[in-house]
């Protein structure tokens, strides 16, 4: 939280977290609450901008960060340092009205003006650029003219920069992930009713293996897709490692047969 204060927008949001049980799994529910907007609670790692996203990620750190997504997304990070970090956050956003639209260049300026370390800035900027390039391609406009809708809201800004901060605090050497489950069905976004995965999500995941799912919900949003697309170096099964800790982050939505959680494995 101290790192996030470097953005100097703390009067715009509050962070809340609690322990809850999802389909039998005790996990941490983490929410971004926008203070200047009504009826907006943004729950992390399960992002639903009127779309929902069921995740359970296993991160096992061994200086190798393996993300495996399968309705339960699993990330495994292997650490070579002595102390252990465990972080889980699952985001899910339900919006009762339109987000503030922000230009890509404005978000870049916000990040560059903050007193973050260079690696944190570079990671956050790469994630936003991945989203901006996808939006620009879909709408047929250059990156510098892209205006974000859902991703331009403070909750998504906190999601992305928070992820960049935590990843670098973990001191992982590499990140691996499983194929990304995207879900199926329809979602409501600013431009209307669209099939799952949303156009931006699909564009962001070019070159990334995705996994078929029968769950009628958005399992991966543009924000989540960009984070994993930028962070993961490989996609496949959990690598061999000696596990040191495991954490679970909870989303808001509940699925009958699938825990809506993010699993993080840390090991060597």
Image (cartoon, rainbow, N blue to C red):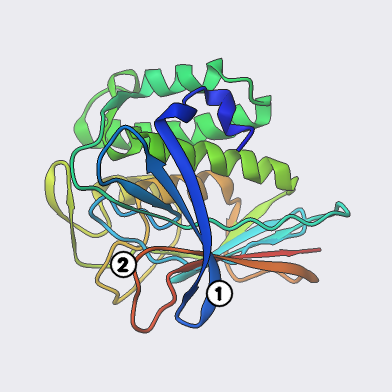
Q: How far, Cα to Cα, is label 1 from label 2?
A: 24 Å
Is 18 positioned to the left or the right of 204 in the image?
A: right
Q: Looking at the rendering, which quadrant does residue 53 occupy? A: bottom left
In the picture, the disc for residue 208 is none
Tell me the element at label 1. Answer: strand
Q: Is residue 22 above or below residue 121?
A: below
Which of the two residues, 204 or 122, is positioned nearer the viewer here? 122
Which of the two residues, 20 or 268, is positioned nearer the viewer here? 20
Is 178 positioned to the left or the right of 207 in the image?
A: right
Which of the two residues, 64 or 20, is positioned nearer the viewer here? 20
Q: Residue at x 63, y 32 (%)?
A: 3
Q: Is residue 130 visible?
A: no
Task: Give the image location of residue 10, x and y in percent.
Answer: 49, 29
Task: Give the image location of residue 192, x and y in percent.
Answer: 11, 47
Task: Give the image location of residue 20, x and y in percent.
Answer: 50, 70
Q: How many marks?
A: 2
Which of the two residues, 54 or 8, is positioned nearer the viewer here? 8
Task: Give the residue number, with chain letter if any, for mark 2.
Answer: 183
Q: Name which of mark 1 and mark 2 comes first in the sequence.
A: 1
Q: Is residue 148 above or below residue 201?
A: above
Badge 2 crowding class, 10 Å Cα cut-off, few under 14, some 14 to 19, many 20 or more, is many
Task: Give the image location of residue 227, x and y in percent.
Answer: 49, 46
Q: Is residue 41 visible?
A: yes
Task: Give the residue number, with chain letter if any, for mark 1.
Answer: 26
Q: Looking at the rendering, which quadrant does residue 23 occupy? A: bottom left
Badge 1 crowding class, 10 Å Cα cut-off, few under 14, some 14 to 19, many 20 or more, is some
- Nearer to us of marks 1 and 2 is 1
Residue at the left extreme of this rendering? 192
Q: Looking at the rendering, which quadrant does residue 237 occupy? A: bottom right
Q: Residue at x 26, y 30 (%)?
A: 100
């Amino acid at each position: 939280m101290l790192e996030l204060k470097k953005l100097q927008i703390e009067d715009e949001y509050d962070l809340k977290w609690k322990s809850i049980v999802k389909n039998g799994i005790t996990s941490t529910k983490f929410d971004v609450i926008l203070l200047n907007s009504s009826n907006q609670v943004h729950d992390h790692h399960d992002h639903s901008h009127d779309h929902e996203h069921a995740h359970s990620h296993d991160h096992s750190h061994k200086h190798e960060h393996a993300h495996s997504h399968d309705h339960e997304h699993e990330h495994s990070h292997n650490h070579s340092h002595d102390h252990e970090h465990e972080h889980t956050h699952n985001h899910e956003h339900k919006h009762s009205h339109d987000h503030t639209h922000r230009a890509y260049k404005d978000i870049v300026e916000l990040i560059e003006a903050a007193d973050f370390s260079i690696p944190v800035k570079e990671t956050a900027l790469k994630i936003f650029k991945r989203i901006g390039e996808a939006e620009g391609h879909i709408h047929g406009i250059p990156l510098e003219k892209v205006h974000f809708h859902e991703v331009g809201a403070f909750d998504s800004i906190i999601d992305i920069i928070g992820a960049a901060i935590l990843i670098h605090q973990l001191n992982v050497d590499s990140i691996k992930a499983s194929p990304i489950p995207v879900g199926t069905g329809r979602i409501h976004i600013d431009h209307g009713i669209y099939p799952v995965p949303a156009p931006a999500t699909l564009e962001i995941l070019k070159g990334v293996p995705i996994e078929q799912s029968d769950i009628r919900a958005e399992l991966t949003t543009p924000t989540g897709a960009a984070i994993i697309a930028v962070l993961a170096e490989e996609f496949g099964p959990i690598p061999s490692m000696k596990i040191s800790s495991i954490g679970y982050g909870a989303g808001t939505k509940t699925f009958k047969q699938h825990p809506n959680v993010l699993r993080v494995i840390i090991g060597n």
